[in-house]
Amino acid sequence: MRALWLTVLLCLGLPAWAEQVKLENVRIWAAPDNTRVVFDVSGPVQHKLSELTSPDRVVVDIQDTRITRAPAQPTKADKYLKLVRNGVRNQNDLRIVLDLKQKTEIKSFLLPPNQHYGHRLVIDLYEPSRSDALQRVSVDKTPPKARDVVIAIDAGHGGEDPGARGPGGTNEKDVVLQIANRLASLINKEYGMRAVLIREGDYYISLRKRIEKARQARADLFISIHADAFRDSRVHGSSVYILSQRGATSEAARWLAEQENASDLIGGVSLDVQDDVLASVLLDLSQTASLEASIEVADRVLDGLKSIGKVHKRDVQAAGFAVLKSPDIPSLLIETAYISNPSEERNLRNGFYQAKLARAILSGIRGYFYEHAPDNTLIAMRKVPKKHIIARGDTLSGIAQRYRISTESLRDHNGLKSDIIKVGQTLTIPSS
């Protein structure tokens, strides 16, 4: 038996006669690569973990605590946890036994209260060799000569972190996962494109891990999907954000980034994993090419959203979102609607409207990669004709310069008799 005493005191000087702590609820979040067991407790606790074998199980002794209801049980699909049992130890202490399906690594930590929860004792279960396995995948995986464009779709929040909540009780984490699934389904039907879902179910993933998963998938684009909220329920419309290297483009953008970046505090992250790797990941975009690509694809996605309804800001916004700080992947964050607006909350719950959002986002992704597909992709090899829709301020010579062709060839290819062009007009770009 291997035992480790873990003492976690958030308040100092607790009197000896303090009221016994209550374990008020047990919540279980099963993800593909870990299971999180959350104990909602009425105050800070001292606890001891013991790992036992034959069969594999974890014993959690919580000092001077009593349970107020039967603990939740894992689903059959849970990869790590089989059963949760409880009993009394030494008359005053609570013993929780986690029966395991396999040998696991264990991490535990206590979280202080926040706007969603009170005190929480968190037990994370995961495979012992997960780090080595991830490293082997990232090093050994060799991309094919002609590959799909990979789109990483990140449904915001999840599990412990519900995100924003609408007046009708809708949780952001639920509707954005539904939208992400619809978008992934559409992308997977496109020639030469493949979607990778960062979050596939109702569980929490740290902001750092979301970036890592996108990089492990060798993503060409990272899209984080959210549903905004504001104290004024009349505010409505969708928005598209990229990472700001300096200040936010508006006070609203700064406020929103602060809310989203607090996700790790709500979802619960053990502080002992905040190492130098995190510091290197959460840097501002250092590669100009990635930022420029983020801007262009964000513009196209915003144009798609404009086609289905009112947008909150007519231009792409910028703010310091931690989840967008991958240095080598073009990244954008989409606030699909204001879940705090009753009308938009109803839209977000509607499958037809979710499909419209997914199609609008796809149109922007498709337009971008048809013009800027990486050289080793199927889309690039197919040589899909490039299209350019004239925007305000465009000139024929400027468009020709952008695509590195001559103004004469652009004019002749489109049958133009002069350099006069109109907003909304579509030009086909000849091969250079």
Image (tube, helix red, strand yellow):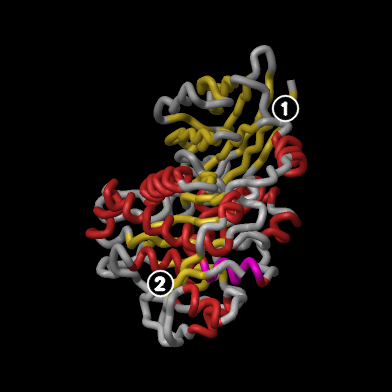
Does 64 sit above or below residue 169? above
Front residue (pair 353, 251): 353
Q: Residue at x 76, y 39 (%)?
A: 140
So how many labels did they put on this image? 2
Upstream in the sequence, badge 1 or badge 2?
1
Measured as percent of width and height from the top left, residue 137 is found at: 71, 39
The residue that label 1 is drawn on is 3
Q: Is residue 60 visible?
A: yes
Q: Nearer the viewer, mark 1 or mark 2?
A: 2
The residue that label 2 is drawn on is 426
Measured as percent of width and height from the top left, residue 335 is found at: 41, 62
Q: Residue at x 45, y 29 (%)?
A: 67
Front residue (pair 368, 221): 368
Q: Secondary structure at mark 2?
A: strand
Does 156 sit above or below residue 426? above
User: In the image, is residue 178 part of the stretch drawn in magenta?
Assistant: no
Assess disc 1: are there few (<14), some (14-19) or many (≥20) residues with their C-alpha within 10 Å of its C-alpha: few
Report whether 344 appears left or right of 123: left
Measured as percent of width and height from the top left, residue 221 is found at: 57, 57
Q: Secondary structure at mark 1?
A: strand
Q: Which mark is residue 178?
A: none
User: In the image, is residue 291 part of the stretch drawn in magenta?
Assistant: yes
Q: Amino acid at mark 2?
A: Thr
Assess disc 2: are there few (<14), some (14-19) or many (≥20) residues with their C-alpha within 10 Å of its C-alpha: some
Specify the segment rendered in magenta. 289-296
